[in-house]
Image (spheres, rainbow, N blue to C red):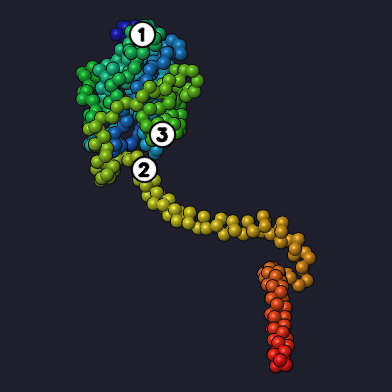
Amino acid sequence: MHSTKGLLVLGCVLAMGTALSPLSATPAWAQLSINIDIGTPPPVAVSPPPLPVYVVPAPPDMDYVWMPGYWSWNDYGYYWVPGTWVQPPAEQVYWTPGYWGWSNEVFVWHEGYWGPHVGFYGGVNYGGGYNGGGFEGGSWDHDHYVVNRTVVNVTNITNITNNNTASFNGGPGGTNAAPTPQQRAAEHEHHVRMSADQVKHIKSAAQNPDLREAANHGRPSVAATSKPGEFKGQNVVAAREAGPRNPVTEKHDENVRSNPSLAKGAAMPKEAAPQREAARPEAVKPEAQPHPVPAEPAHAEPRQEPIEKVAPEKIAPEAEHKNPVEERAHPAPEARPQPEERPHPEAARPEEHRPETEHAPERKPEEEKPKEEERKAE
């Protein structure tokens, strides 16, 4: 897969590097980026999420190597580093992706690197030529890197979509792959750490809240991109769906969350759910506030209705004429004139009856006396 010319070039470069720096056995081209480090994620007690299903975008130009996407870790928990095409730091080098491995009952990150051969990457099926058992994504043809389009075919979605979503090696629900003799040999070769463009790409992903697993739930809006750090535009590919969860892995994570002693000092995600649940009972307390709230408008409504609607229209003009006397006792004068009007007819009625009763007794005795006198005379 690698030409003899390429090996000779590496040998010449190594000789030049040794001549220039007798104290260093590291190749000169490796020193270009060997000091660039973004920090290795700490051991984590819970498993990384499954790999999302996405399509590898087209490379932006020749001599670009595919760096598959993966889940990394920071203080906010797991976050997605989108896959991207990167320029290698030198000719005749290949990228070995990093991977999460199960060790001492926690998940440990193994950093990726550049080297003359692709090493072991946990058997994780990252896609784009990294099928878990080796690398078929491309090769060097003299001084140019050629993408293997039979595997990384930008026109055939089936060949470039990742369907096996296990994101770690070993442990509960991880891959069972073990390094081959060739991959073990590649681990002892001279390696080059990620380039400056790769570092910037990862830092940008770490600072993007949308790429956090807590926000995207395993389905990042930027799953892959054509160039490092390019998280917007036509060349950005979103995840088609989140990877399916493994019940065995889920059970392990639930046990660790419910019993933090199982973490053994490893990093744990900042659980937002328990904090919100603790805050919910506090939110229940303000439910007692609605009781005084309706009471306030209840007192305010009766005050506004008699004053605004009735008082200014009818009472105000009457009060203007009766200010000197009637302002002190408005209800008294209003009640007095009404009963005074009613007794007038009642007073008139007894006057009509009185004359009838007065004339009746007067006339009767007068009429009876002459009748009696006439009888006596007779």
Quadrant location, the N terminus: top left
**Along the line of sight, the residue nearer the viewer: 6 or 248:** 248
Query: What separation in Å lies between label 2 and label 1 (alpha carbons)?
Result: 45 Å
Q: Earlier in the sequence, mark 3 or mark 1?
A: 1
Question: SS of the residue at dot 1?
Answer: loop
Q: Is residue 328 visible?
A: no
Residue at x 31%, y 6% (from the top left corner): 4
Frontmost of labels 2 and 1 is 2
Q: Is residue 309 left or right of residue 152?
A: right
Query: What separation in Å lies between label 3 and label 1 (alpha carbons)?
Result: 34 Å
Q: Earlier in the sequence, mark 2 or mark 3?
A: 3
On the image, numbered disc 1 is attached to which residue?
149
From the top left corner, tell me how far across and down residue 221 is, in percent. 43, 26
From the top left corner, tell me how far across and down residue 190 is, in percent. 32, 21
Q: Earlier in the sequence, mark 2 or mark 1?
A: 1
* Amino acid type indicated by mark 2: Ala
* Amino acid type indicated by mark 3: Ala
**Along the line of sight, the residue nearer the viewer: 69 or 310:** 310
On the image, numbered disc 3 is attached to which residue?
215
Mark 1 residue crowding within 10 angstroms, few (<14) / some (14–19) / many (20+): some
Question: SS of the residue at dot 2?
Answer: helix
Q: Is residue 63 left or right of residue 164?
A: right
Q: Is residue 184 above or below residue 275?
A: above
